[in-house]
Amino acid sequence: VKVLLTGGSGFIAAHIVDILLQHGFDTVVTVRSDDKGKKILEAHPDTPKHKLSYVIVKDVAQDGAFDEAVKSNPPFDYVLHTASPFHFNVEDPVKDFLDPAIKGTTGILKAIKAYAPEVKRVVITSSFAAIVNGNQHPKVYSEENWNPVTWEEAMDPSNVYRASKTFAEKAAWDFVKTEKPNFDIATINPPLVFGPVVHYLNSLDAINTSNQRMRNIIQGQMKEKLAPTGVFLWVDVRDVALAHVKAIEVPEAGGQRFFVTAGYFSNKDLVDIVRETHPELESKLPPKDSPNDLPENIYGIDNSKSLQILGLKYHSFKESVSDTIDSLLAVGA
Ligand code: NDP
């Protein structure tokens, strides 16, 4: 059984590669350069070529970007689409975020419909960003909720990442409704993803966006003052990766969104764990009496679909934080 995984060089995708291989899938990843592809193969020296290889897709926003990548012999059975920009360097909201997110998603679906009719399911990495309503939280967040962000609001750099994920996911569901392709889709909607780094990382300067606060904390960047938490929901990258693979393995996952979260956290909880598991870092850590900004009457969360249909069992926050810090120290703090 053969799978195409886009954005192979990414933080989450690298964990998906590991699980796909463990579960016996033949895996082809897309990357932006030969160099990035080679790094992935080097990380799996014992894996034969027919089990793991790469193809180059330089920019997912280009028309027809995936037309060649989706063709394969034997053909692909499943596609996992993770490639999408996730950072906060916004110069041009449309070019930097909305185009690659939206056109990347519709582009791959069009290419599959036209050139890869054997594909049965496409799993798309969406986000809690496509669920959250920052203006008015519902009582309980679940797959029923959609971010109400408008195109106009998306031009604000502080909104554009969330908007890009919202519009891309909407475009995917619309595509299936109007184009009625041979495949169905499922989306994985994680909040902030923490966890060990297994992708190639030259230095901690290049750490992926969602692990940046962990790096900042252990480098002493919050020594004087702990930064506000921002989003109070998290999930471990290994659980997010497994959710993607389960979403192709479990027939009932088709046509579903999955809100995958392990629960609430605050930066204060995070630092308390680092203090306990890595006492040698004490001199870098924020003050012991930093306030905990987790609101007492915070919105509810319902992740039951991910437990029942995908069978996820979430990592604990302590395990996730401790493993993440270990992996960052291994890269070199
Ligand atoms: P990374 O930045 O590590 O991965 C993003 C991947 O997308 C990289 O492989 C990157 O390639 C690729 N990419 C970005 N833009 C383009 C483009 N224009 N053309 C081709 N490839 C592109 O982040 P994550 O692993 O965290 O993110 C993976 C997915 O998960 C994204 O869809 C993100 O929105 C989603 N997500 C992440 C969360 C998190 O907290 N980490 C939370 C919720 C959703 P390159 O390395 O070459 O730049």
Image (cartoon, grey):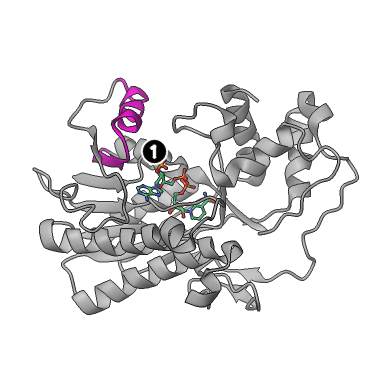
Tell me the residue at 88%/40% (across/down): 287
The answer, for residue 315, to whether it is visible in the render is no
Farthest residue to the top: give it.
Answer: 45
- Residue drawn 56% across and 45% down? 209
Percent x, y of residue 172: 32, 68
Span colored in magenta: 24-45
Q: Quadrant of the C terminus?
A: top right
Q: Which residue is mark 1?
A: 9
78 left or right of 95 in image: left
Q: Nearer the viewer, residue 30 or 297?
A: 30
Q: Residue 277 at x, y = what percent? A: 73, 31
Of the pair 194 and 314, the residue shown nearer to us: 194
Return the residue found at the far front: 91
Which residue of the protein is positioned furthest toward the left in this rendering? 73
> Considering the image in quadrants, where does the N terminus appear?
top left
The answer to whether residue 135 of the structure is visible from this angle is yes
